[in-house]
Structure formats: C-alpha cells, structure tokens
C-alpha cells in the first residue's frame, strides 16, 4: 500500500508542470521566430540586392584634379563689361546656393539665346562666369544647352 500512496502523491504534485509549460512556450517562440524570418527574408534579400546594385554603380573618383572651365581669359562681349565686372560677378555667383545658381543660369541662358543686343551680349558674359562656377562645383551645363564658348564665339568674342 505504500506504493499506492506514492502514486497518489505523484498525481497530486504539480510543481513539475511548470517545466512542461516553459518547454511549450519556448517551442512556440522559436516557431514564431522562424515564421517571421521566412516572411521577412525575401524582402531583406530584395533590399540587399538593390543595395548591392546601387553600390556597384557608384563611380569612384581616382583623381581629384579635374579640368575646370576657365573663361577668365575670354574677351568680354558686353559693351560695358570689364575685368572688375567679371570679378564682382564671380563673387556674387560664388556666394549662391546650387539651386539659386542654376536658376540664375537658366534665366541668363534664356536671354542669351533669344535676346536682343546688348542684353544678349551681357547675359552671354554672365553665362561664362556662371559656367566657371558650375564646373568648380561639379554641376553640368543642362543637356541641350549651348555652352558658353560657342555662344561667345557666335557673338564675335575671342578665346584666351
């Protein structure tokens, strides 16, 4: 009968049930982690592929000396322009933000290609100063625009 009491005590004892609960909870958490990994992995894989593509398309400069546009020796075609005018314009455009510089460039370009003398000549000289500043900043002349050297020579200006 001692054996029967031991079985009765064993059946009534519940302190071991906590271990079983923790095993079930841990298994559930691991299963949830695996499910989340499965769902998220394809998105992460796509993002890592996009990142790899972007990184391979980056052009790394191997030289830090580039040929900048320098029109300082070009003759000025504006009737009232002088080298001091050019210097003051360089300071003015050098202080502008990239966006303001491009806005000024576009306004001057519109006048230079469709303007009337003396405005056409004046804005062409100004474009030369702006293109020099743009080149120093790494900003390209907008696609389809005629560059300063061509505009300048079309007005009878002489290069350096």
Image: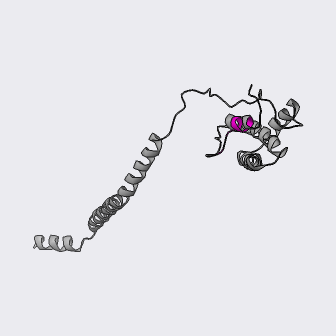
Residue furthest out toward the right: 80
Residue at (43%, 45%) from the top-left corner? 53
Viewer-proximal residue among 130 and 54:
130
Residue 97 placement (x, y as % from top left) = 74, 45
Q: Quadrant of the C terminus?
A: top right
Viewer-proximal residue among 155 and 11:
155
Q: Is residue 147 above or below residue 64?
A: below
Viewer-proximal residue among 41 and 137:
137
Residue 109 placement (x, y as % from top left) = 73, 46
In the image, taking residue 49 as reference, residue 16 lies left or right, namely: left
Residue at (87%, 32%) from the top-left corner? 82
In the image, taking residue 72 as reference, residue 21 lies left or right, namely: left
Q: Is residue 11 above or below residue 128?
A: below
Residue at (11%, 70%) from the top-left corner? 3
Residue 48 placement (x, y as % from top left) = 41, 49
Viewer-proximal residue among 82 and 139:
82
Q: How would you classify the magenta stretch by its main secondary structure?
A: helix
Which residues are drawn in magenta? Answer: 145-152
All told, the count of numbered labels is 0
Q: Quadrant of the N terminus?
A: bottom left
Which coloring applies here?
Answer: one colour
Q: Looking at the rendering, which quadrant does residue 117 occupy?
A: top right
Q: Is residue 13 above or below residue 82?
A: below
Answer whether residue 117 is magenta in the image: no
In the image, taking residue 132 as reference, residue 34 lies left or right, namely: left
Residue at (87%, 35%) from the top-left corner? 81
Residue 93 placement (x, y as % from top left) = 78, 40
């Amino acid at each position: 009968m001692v054996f029967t009491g031991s079985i009765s005590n064993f059946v009534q004892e519940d302190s071991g049930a906590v271990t079983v609960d923790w095993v079930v909870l841990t298994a559930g958490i691991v299963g949830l982690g695996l499910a989340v990994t499965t769902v998220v992995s394809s998105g992460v894989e796509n993002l890592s592929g996009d990142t790899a593509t972007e990184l391979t398309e980056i052009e790394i400069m191997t030289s830090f000396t580039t040929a900048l546009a320098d029109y300082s020796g070009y003759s000025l075609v504006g009737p009232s322009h002088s080298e001091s005018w050019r210097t003051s314009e360089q300071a003015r455009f050098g202080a502008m933000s990239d966006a303001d510089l491009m806005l000024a460039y576009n306004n001057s370009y519109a006048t230079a290609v469709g303007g009337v003398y003396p405005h056409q000549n004046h804005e062409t000289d100004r474009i030369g100063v702006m293109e020099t500043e743009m080149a120093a900043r790494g900003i390209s002349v907008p696609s389809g625009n005629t560059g300063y050297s061509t505009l300048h020579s079309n007005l009878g200006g002489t290069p350096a």
